[in-house]
Amino acid sequence: LAKTTQPISMDSYEGQEVNITCSHNNIATNDYITWYQQFPSQGPRFIIQGYKTKVTNEVASLFIPADRKSSTLSLPRVSLSDTAVYYCLVGDALAGNMLTFGGGTRLMVKP
Amino acid sequence: DAGVTQSPTHLIKTRGQHVTLRCSPISGHKSVSWYQQVLGQGPQFIFQYYEKEERGRGNFPDRFSARQFPNYSSELNVNALLLGDSALYLCASSLERDQETQYFGPGTRLLVL
């Protein structure tokens, strides 16, 4: 399984754009990149998934360069309610449902 | 539709006891997975069940077991509890077996004294 590396924590202010980068140098050809969000005392929540280039949904954008060795989750105009832990996962969707979570990035949004 | 539900929400046990945690997946979801999340760490995979059969197992001792029922609900059992078993136990469901988009329940917080 590809190992992921992301910053332990980040601080931001309301209204700013936040970019969280994840490194996955050993990503395999079949691997997808998935991001989850987790609030305290709740289960993780799926945010976005991609394979290459750029993916955008109503919550976030995911940028993946051509070599796929890293990815960046972009949260536009964050609010206080975006304070959470964000996990970057890399895995083969055909390998079953064994999600491998790292330590995640603890985002603190300040007023 | 209701999301993934888990019971109980909180539980306190003592070392050596046994615990059973329950999970009801989203209606129509056939796959259920269990994760353990120790405070300050990411969730760690314990089991996956699909169509009532174990399809995956993480690096956990045999004290941990699980099963899935015909209605796709699931139970996680832990025997001979240790202090280190104190954690948030998360259940996640997905429509089919091979999907990375999983829907997590709120978890059961277990405290072992």
Image (cartoon, grey):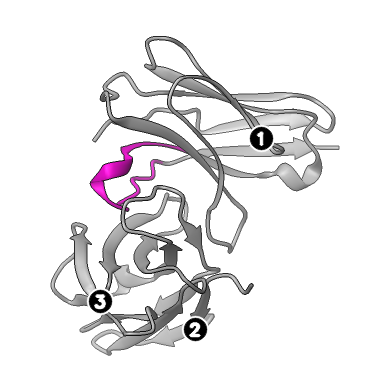
Image x and y of residue A82, in percent: 72, 43
**Are callouts 1 and 2 both on one chain?**
no
Q: Residue at x 27, y 63 (%)?
A: B46
Say which of B32 and A3 sits in front: B32
Image x and y of residue B72, in percent: 37, 78
Image x and y of residue B77, in percent: 28, 82
Residue at image mark 2: B7
- Relative vertical location of residue A47 with respect to residue A21 in this rendering, above or below: below
Give SS at disc 1.
Answer: loop
**Are callouts 3 and 2 both on one chain?**
yes
The kind of residue on which mark 3 rests is Lys
Residue at image mark 3: B52
Mark 2: give few (<14), some (14-19) or many (20+) Cα within 10 Å: some
Residue at image mark 1: A57
Q: Residue at x 53, y 71 (%)?
A: B4
Magenta-span inclusion, residue B110: no
